[in-house]
Image: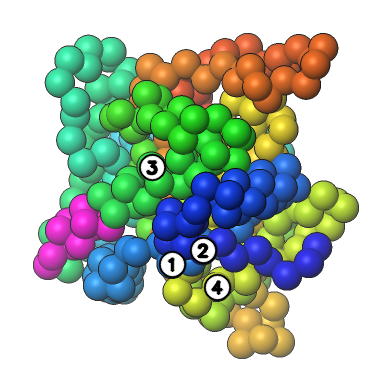
Amino acid sequence: MSAFPVFDLGRFEQASAAERRAMAAEVDRICRSTGFLAIANHGVPAETIDGVWNKAHEFFDLAPAEKQKARAPYPGYPYGYLGPELEALAKSRGVDTPPDLKESFNGGPLGTPEGIQDKDALSFCYAPTIWPAAPEGFADAWKAYYAAMEDLAARIMRLFAAALELPEDFFDRYIKTPISALRALNYPEQTVPPRPGQLRAGAHSDYGSLTILLPQEGSKGLEIITPDGEWTPVPPVPGAFVINIGDLMARWTNDRWVSTVHRVVNPPAEEGGMARRQSLAFFHQPDWDAEIACIEPCLAPGEKPKYEPVLSGPYLMSKFRSTTKTAA
Ligand SMILES: O=C(O)CCC(=O)C(=O)O
Ligand SMILES: [Fe+2]
């Protein structure tokens, strides 16, 4: 693979029609190959990013008992603090591994839209986020970043529509009240050797439409499988987000775009080995009842849809349950 692609979103949005077409075609090319690229000139204020980054760092620094006060109230609950040894992402692909070497804090949509009646939607996606009491200001910083990500995701979905040569508002009707989740991840300092097969995040693809990732500056560990079948590092790009498409986008496009398998590997001992690593992952997910069915223009002449239509919310719920220890 050539150098990791960096896309200038601000420039795209200001560009002439011809330049937009050329830039969108480049995104189509990337999404056909790996679906991983960096988004620069995104307009998210540094204070919004630093605010949640620092609060998350302070939260992860707290004593385990303090963090546990914000834990998900029962196994399988999607939000709040998820301590070590509770998730193995490789299980989403049917691979049995020891649990990932990480802890996370997770939050859902900032509000519940009126008229939602579906019991699963209410008890899963719209379940309350369990806010930690400390550090002070955590929830405000979190919500500001979540809102900024929701807005950025909508802009990127317009870029994706352009890349698929669809009207730029094509996806708007599917993302009126998205059920996205924000996850702060901490991969603690590793003081004992991992068990066989144990990684910081096991090999998986993301489930939704789009992931907006902020890896720790200068950190290593994130790897993707490139089309040649090789594990390849994805470097953090200063000032930019790393984005990737998820399984729903692959289904939507009939696999024209790939939801690339990725993982976070353990730090090698000879490189300061045990270093802690933090990241923020925003999992953009269409509305609970959005039907994800093959987009017709993605079908080549004579080609048939490969996947049955699915509903965004129930699809997400089943994927989530496959990786998390749930009540027996
Ligand atoms: O922490 C990272 O860099 C990636 C995490 C990830 O891929 C995930 O949680 O889905
Ligand atoms: Fe991921």
Q: Which amino acid does label 4 sit on?
A: Val
Residue at 57 percent across and 54 percent down: it is: 19
Q: Which of marks 2 and 3 is nearer the N terminus?
A: 2
Under tag 1, what secondary structure? loop
- The residue wearing badge 1 is 41
Label 4 or label 3, whichever lies nearer to me, is 3
Label 2 or label 4, whichever lies nearer to me, is 2
- The residue wearing badge 2 is 8
Identify the image quadrant of residue 194: bottom right
Tell me the number on the disc at residue 154: 3
Q: Which amino acid does label 3 sit on?
A: Ala
Looking at the rendered image, the quarter that the N terminus falls into is bottom right
Mark-to-mark CA distance, 4 and 3: 21 Å
Q: Earlier in the sequence, mark 3 or mark 1?
A: 1
Residue 171 falls inside the magenta stretch: no
Under tag 4, what secondary structure? loop
Residue at 76 percent across and 53 percent down: it is: 225
